[in-house]
Image (cartoon, rainbow, N blue to C red):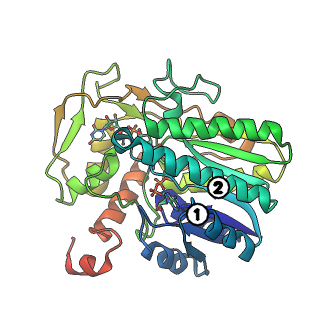
């Protein structure tokens, strides 16, 4: 029996596919490569020594996706496929609603038609909006401030309705905090399109000399050093959380929701410092205005996942920085090997 990994060529999906293969699961990846590279598939196979079935398909295309269900014995679906840039979602809301919502509906429809009962959904801490206090528990009020976040909340609401109506379905909603880091090998990692919006990829690009300096968005928040505090989590820990979630779904729990974070909050300047230490490189920065829509503080209480899934993040901030740097320095131009071989990095 196989796991269909929707969006499996992407950052979190590729790391999860590796852990699934290592655990002995059969993996079928479906991705339209709108934010990823086909090279990822060969690297997954290289790292695991196992074959991965890959379909280059847009998940909104029901006819094509149905072939994947018909050609494979799919037992469960992990749904990573989404557009995920918060800023872009504000300028292109229709694309976000259309892609993220329709691809989810198509997946759920085909699961129903093909009698597949287990579904793991990539949600986000963004559904907590501006939390009234930290650490954040799963039953905190939900609210969102941008179209990307709203797609996550709409899908969560939809899943709650669907699970209520069909007791044979088992669904895990996983709310990720801030994924960073990369596979230990340095062969797969995050490859943002253009100038990164997120902090860690921005830092790695400054450290390697592709960007001049980091702009720190505000130093007047009510946090220990005035800069924004987040719960950074190693992507391999996150990947392992999906295995635990699949195991949980074997017990037919109905719909379950978990925070996947470490429970530790680090500020922007904490991360800059930890990264400089891990990479032995300076990260020049300047303080600028706050970024619209940012919250001061966001970190998880991950104890529900520990208690019910037996999952706990094991990598700390130093390993997150070391592995992000290893990926960046071994692949200064991402998955384009031809360019990488021409660039020497010490
Ligand atoms: P990513 O962009 O690297 O991966 C998403 C993958 O989905 C990409 O490979 C993309 O090509 C594919 N995709 C998108 N739409 C598709 C479609 N219609 N058909 C087929 N493939 C499609 O992103 P990621 O960081 O790996 O995120 C994975 C999931 O986790 C997303 O749902 C994202 O919203 C969620 N999430 C990410 C973060 C984060 O900071 N990275 C945090 C919280 C939640
Ligand atoms: C982290 C901190 C910034 C860039 C986003 C999405 C969220 C989730 C994860 C998908 C903040 C500061 C950043 C920079 C900076 N994604 N920063 N200079 O905003 O917590 O979360 O990614 O679901 O939905 O909103 O992550 O990495 O952008 O920012 O000072 O150049 O770094 O202000 O305090 P964020 P981030």
| Mark toward the start of the polypeptide (2 vs 1) | 1
| Label number found at residue 228 | none
Compared across the picture, whether 185 is left or right of 90 comes to right
Residue at numbered disc 2:
106
**Residue at 43%, 76% in the rendered image:** 39
Beta carbon of the mark 1 residue lies under 8 A of ligand 1? yes
Picture quarter with the N terminus: bottom right
**Residue at 36%, 38% in the rendered image:** 90
Q: What's the CA distance linking mark 2 and mark 1?
A: 8 Å
Residue at numbered disc 1:
61
Give the image quarter of residue 45: bottom right
Report the front residue among 130 and 163: 163
Asked which secondary structure carries label 1, the reply is loop
Q: Is residue 103 above or below residue 145?
A: below
Look at the numbered discs 2 and 1 and tell me whether their residues touch, using CB distance below 8 Å.
yes
**Residue at 57%, 35% in the rendered image:** 153
Asked which secondary structure carries label 2, the reply is helix
Can residue 52 be seen at all in this image of the molecule?
yes
**Residue at 68%, 73% in the rendered image:** 67
Give the image quarter of residue 65: bottom right
Where residue 2 sits in the image (x, y, percent)? Answer: 72, 69
């Amino acid at each position: 029996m196989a796991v269909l990994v929707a969006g499996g060529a992407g950052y979190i999906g590729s790391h999860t596919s590796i852990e699934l293969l290592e655990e002995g699961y059969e993996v079928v990846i479906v991705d339209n490569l709108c934010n990823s590279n086909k090279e990822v598939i060969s690297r997954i196979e290289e790292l695991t020594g196992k074959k991965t079935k890959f379909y280059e398909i847009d998940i909104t295309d029901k006819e094509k996706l149905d072939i994947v269900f018909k050609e494979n014995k799919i037992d469960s679906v992990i749904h990573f496929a989404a557009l995920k840039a918060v800023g872009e979602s504000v300028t292109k809301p229709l694309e976000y609603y259309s892609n993220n919502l329709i691809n989810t509906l198509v997946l759920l429809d085909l699961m129903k038609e093909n009698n597949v009962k287990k579904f793991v959904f990539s949600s986000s801490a963004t559904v907590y909006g501006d939390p009234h206090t930290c650490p954040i528990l799963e039953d905190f009020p939900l609210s969102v401030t941008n179209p990307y976040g709203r797609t996550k909340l709409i899908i969560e609401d939809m899943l709650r309705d669907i699970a209520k109506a069909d007791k044979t379905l088992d669904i895990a909603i996983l709310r990720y905090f801030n994924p960073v880091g990369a596979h230990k090998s340095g062969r797969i990692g995050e490859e943002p399109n253009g100038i990164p919006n997120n902090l860690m990829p921005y830092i790695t690009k400054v450290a390697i000399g592709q960007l001049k300096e980091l702009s720190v968005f505000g130093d007047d928040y009510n946090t220990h050093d005035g800069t924004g505090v987040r719960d950074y989590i190693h992507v391999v820990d996150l990947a392992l959380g999906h295995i635990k979630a699949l195991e949980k779904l074997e017990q037919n729990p109905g719909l379950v929701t978990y925070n996947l974070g470490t429970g530790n909050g680090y500020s922007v300047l904490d991360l800059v410092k930890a990264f400089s230490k891990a990479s032995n490189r300076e990260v020049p920065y300047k303080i600028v205005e706050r970024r619209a829509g940012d919250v001061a503080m966001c970190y998880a209480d991950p104890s529900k996942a520990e208690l019910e899934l037996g999952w706990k993040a094991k990598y700390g901030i130093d390993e997150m920085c070391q592995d992000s740097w290893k990926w960046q320095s071994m692949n200064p131009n991402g998955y384009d090997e031809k360019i990488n071989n021409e660039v020497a990095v010490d």
